[in-house]
Amino acid sequence: MDIRAQVSMVFHLDKCIGCHTCSIACKNIWTDRKGTEYMWWNNVETKPGTGYPTTWEDQDKYKGGWVKDGDRLRLRLQGRTEGLGNIFFNPNLPTIDDYYEPWTYQYDELFNAPEGDDQPTARPISLITGKPMDIEAGPNWDDDLGGSPIYASNDVNLEKLTEHEREQLNEVERLVFFYLPRICNHCLNPSCVAACPSGAIYKRGEDGIVLISQEKCRAWRMCVSGCPYKKTYYNWATGKSEKCILCYPRLETGQAPACFHSCVGRIRYLGLLLYDADRIQETALADEADLVMAQRRIIQDPFDPLVIHAAKANGITDQQIAAAQNSPSYKFVKKWGIALPLHPEFRTLPMLFYVPPMLPVLGKMKDGIYDSSAVEGMGQMLNSLEKARIPVRYMASLFSAGNEEIIREVYRKNIAVRLFKRAQRVKDISAAEAQEALEIGKTTAEEAEAIFNLTSLPTMEERFVIPAFAREEAIEQSLDPYTHKPAAGFGYREAPARRW
Amino acid sequence: MTGDQSSGHCKRRHFLRIAFRRVPLAYVVAAAAFAMIPAYVTGAAQADQGSTVFATKCAACHTIGKGKSVGPDLKGITTTEDPGWLARWIAAPSALVKAGDPTAMRLVKQYPLQMPDLGLSSGDVDAVLAYVAQQSGSARAHVKGPLAPVAAPPPGDAGVGRELFVGGARFHNGGPPCMSCHSISGIGALGGGTLGPDLTDAYRKYGGDAGLASFLTSVPTPTMSAVWSKQPMTPQEIANLTGFVKEGAVSERPLGAIGKLALLAVIALVIIVLIGALYWRRRLLGVRIPLVARANMLFNRKYARRS
Ligand code: SF4
Ligand code: SF4
């Protein structure tokens, strides 16, 4: 047993209101520099939709992640020889147009334009060429199903649906969407790290945050192709790749990352997980249907004395163990089992988990008026899975590598919590019915209460359980902490120069 | 032509030091010269040493009283030219050429080959001058053994010479094929190496059979002597090569060859570019633009059908 600590995240999609506050918080802190204008380390996508960059989930095109090859894992991108052949000419990159061409506006013309008959306008100016441009796309161009015949209907996950199911999604009365905020998953088995020919990407030992060294990066951009989530980006001004750093300078000082801190819907949770690093390979090699369960299995019980002992032997501090015991991620992912990894079939073992959104059921129209009574009653609620406007299969394609049973389980439990609370508060459901729902959802009154509390009424301290990172201990083998402290930060110590 | 040669020469100067260090013969001569100076101060003794130097270093291109070869006939040169100038010229011709010395420039213009820097010590220079003076005095006085390599060369086979030149046959004593440093017309479109001069016109420049044979026997240039002094060519090989070089002088360099080569290069380039384009064809194929185009096309088709 090789117990390590991982900062892990949970996004509760039922609560996301699609306000993009998280993206803006991130942009203002990290990516408003030259060369990073097009990057959104945090972005919020509408599902169904093609996302950012366009159809990033399509690995036939982008070649991200791992493929199971017998009892071995292999990068989908390339082997060593192919990597050498492609090293000066990486063929699997998104173009700037697949992200979008970033722009600003000529605001000063609003004030400085000479007097005339027409209102002055602020023309859009490309942040890449500096010339006026026509805006054709943006990072959330298909927000709220905008342009859905183009974008939403090309969602890669729809391929798993039948023709009939797909048509239904386009019916006016059935149109439905939800938001999917995305950051780097700080994977346990990151393919960005494996794809880098320079060895510039590393996973921090003490917290599992995945970082790109701005000194070692040599601009091969294999990580951009290698990451199936397209969460590393190439900075064309510095010639280095960059990615979400999980605001580690904030974490190290006890603050939640900016996107977590600013989240309006309070959908974001962050806490430590203890996992067994010896089992990473076995987990990443699990059968497709078993991937989610395997990922739950690799996460260890922080109350188990054996695990605690092994953790201490690996230098994990008492504070970190206490944080892991208190971790909202541990509860959502392992204890309650209602948070799922995004696209586990990429086999990078992502450490960002999503509680899937409740699926709105199809209402009935009575004389042109929406009839809410049609969805009343427990039976209706539990049956709603079959009537959901987004098919379970779609959710399974997103969150369980196609295993629909896992999705059903999660939904049954979430519905049970709702019915349980409804019986308590609204009292239009009998206690017996609520009890039955709990049984169907394989949960108990206590657990339902706990889920409800952490979902709806959590305090800041419950959402973000951030231990002291003991960074000084982590670095002291290689660097005097007093030397490190005033010298650390984002960026490079030497200006990057091209040397031929 | 002259400019070419002097620049080639500058390059070769670089080899000089190395060549000098590597060639024991040069060492022996230089050391012997130094050792001899205090002991034999008389002209005769010097001339004796000079004969050795002349045979190994000068005879390939010069005669004393036997007429012009690659270089001028040296008979009486010690009386017609300023001895100081002569000494400087023999010691380092390239230095004088570089300095733009008028006599040196005239020589360079007049003769096909610029005299190479031979790496002679001042003792050698004095000795060889003494020897030339002595030989000039008695025009009939004949020179000792090695001085006459031209004596009845065996008849050469140009075909075998060609094989030796292009490396199809080995030199008996080892040594690289000529083609590794030289080019000549008549060995195909790609030609040979460019370290040494092109030998198409060498037969005329080096004074025909006798001149070439003596050049190849004594290999006076520093670069060549570094290569050949320890593994000399046999007289038969020299004759064969001379035969081939002689033919080379008359055989036309096929004009079409250059065109053919250029054509081959263009075809190869096109093939490489095509393979690259095929192999990397997926790169820079955007996703979004085709997506939008396809959706628009479908929409238009549907709309057109309905209306
Ligand atoms: S999500 Fe993050 S850690 Fe995982 S492969 Fe992509 S960049 Fe690497
Ligand atoms: S800030 Fe929170 S609620 Fe708003 S889009 Fe981001 S994740 Fe969703």
Image (spheres, coloured by chain):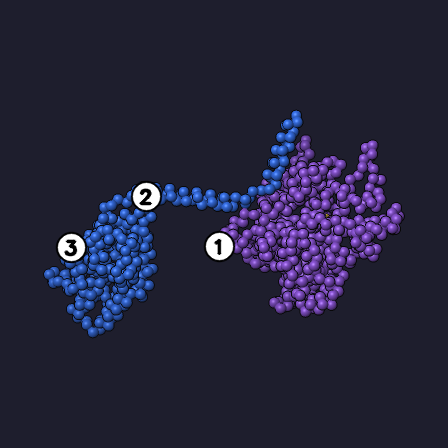
Chain colours: A purple, B blue
Residue at 74 percent of width and 49 percent of height: A408
Q: Is residue B60 left or right of residue A440?
A: left
What amino acid type is highlighted by mark number 3?
Gly
Residue at 52 percent of width and 52 percent of height: A82
Residue marked by disc 1 = A500
* Label 1 packing within 10 angstroms: few (<14), some (14-19), many (20+): few
The quarter of the picture where residue B181 lies is bottom left
Q: Chain of mark 2?
A: B
Q: Of helix, strand and loop, which one carries label 1? A: loop
What amino acid type is highlighted by mark number 1?
Trp
* Label 2 packing within 10 angstroms: few (<14), some (14-19), many (20+): few
Q: Of helix, strand and loop, which one carries label 3? A: loop
The numbered mark, 3 or 2, whose residue comes first in the sequence reads 3
Kindly indicate whether the residues beneath marks 3 and 2 are on one polypeptide chain.
yes
Residue at 32 percent of width and 49 percent of height: B191
Q: Nearer the viewer, mark 2 or mark 1?
A: 2
Q: Is residue B89 left or right of residue A380?
A: left
Observer able to see residue A440: yes
What amino acid type is highlighted by mark number 2?
Ala
Q: Of helix, strand and loop, which one carries label 2? A: helix
